[in-house]
Amino acid sequence: MQYSQDFKTAAIALCNAGKFIDSKGWVPATSGNFSARLPDGTIAITTSGKHKGHLQVEDIMLIDHDANSLDGKKSSAETGLHTTLYKRYPTIQAILHPHSINAILVSKIFGDVIVLENYELLKAMHSITTHETRITVPIFANDQDIPRLAHVVDQYLDTVNDCYGYIIAGHGLYTWGESILEALRHLEALDYLFDCELRLHGVRKP
Ligand SMILES: CSCCC(=O)C(=O)COP(=O)(O)O
Ligand SMILES: [Zn+2]
């Protein structure tokens, strides 16, 4: 398979994102998956079962927008969650899925959503310009049936305007952005804000 320069650039950026995310402890064992949409609409995505902190360019593969492998490699078990988001949001170019402890804890103590409001760091989210903002991060039940889970997420997203990420209960966070860097910014900000809420609710020492 002859990969394009766009693919190679995205693959290196995803490997570097993995190193950073792993340095935060957000992708233990072989958890998590990452992707980036290329200018031609194909998607660079992590192959299944690799440690996402130790990714090599060979661990990134190419799929089409319907999740078909274009290079014979086996994509993430959760590829359908990525392709569903790319179809919904034409402007997003990257999706990150870590298994961060704070996302897991949030799903254990909050109900169907966690609401984040009046935090300066909300301005790290795309197009938010003031702390006087309220964002809702939905929490979905985990499901081993990824097409069914993707459908549940998609139905929810039909009902809201702005969404920056969602939590799968006991599993992890999905967040996205208009670039890998923006998705990383969203991930770091959401994790920080989850941490604030967990401390407020006595889960962590302030
Ligand atoms: C060992 S974690 C279980 C699978 C998972 O939730 C995940 O994020 C990693 O799966 P992948 O197929 O993308 O490696
Ligand atoms: Zn996962």
Image: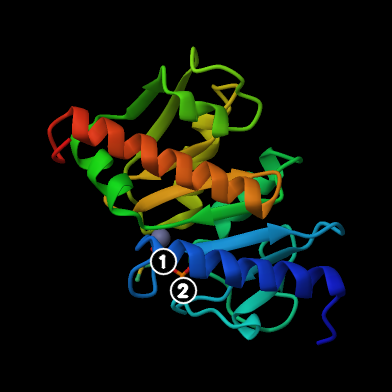
Q: Residue furthest top?
A: 132
Label 1, label 2: how far apart the Cα atoms are: 8 Å
Residue at 69% across, 39% down = 89
- Say if 34 sits above or below 103 in the image: below
Identify the residue position indicated by label 2 in the image: 53
Residue at 47% across, 46% down = 188
Q: Amino acid at mark 1?
A: Ser
Percent from the top left, x then y, of residue 163? 55, 30
- Say if 133 sits above or below 14 in the image: above
Percent from the top left, x then y, of residue 27? 39, 65
* Disc 1: CA contacts within 10 A as few (<14), some (14-19) or many (>=20): few
Residue at 64% across, 51% down = 181
Which quadrant of the frame does ligand 2 lie within?
bottom left
| Dot placed on the residue nearer the N-terminal end, 1 or 2 | 1
Percent from the top left, x then y, of residue 32? 44, 64
Identify the residue position indicated by label 1 in the image: 23
Foreground mark, 1 or 2, reads 1
Residue 140 visible in the displayed image: yes
Q: Are marks 1 and 2 in contact (CB under 8 Å)?
A: yes
Say left or right for 138 vs 48.
Answer: left
Residue 169 visible in the displayed image: no
- Say if 15 sits above or below 145 in the image: below
Name the image quarter holding the C terminus: top left
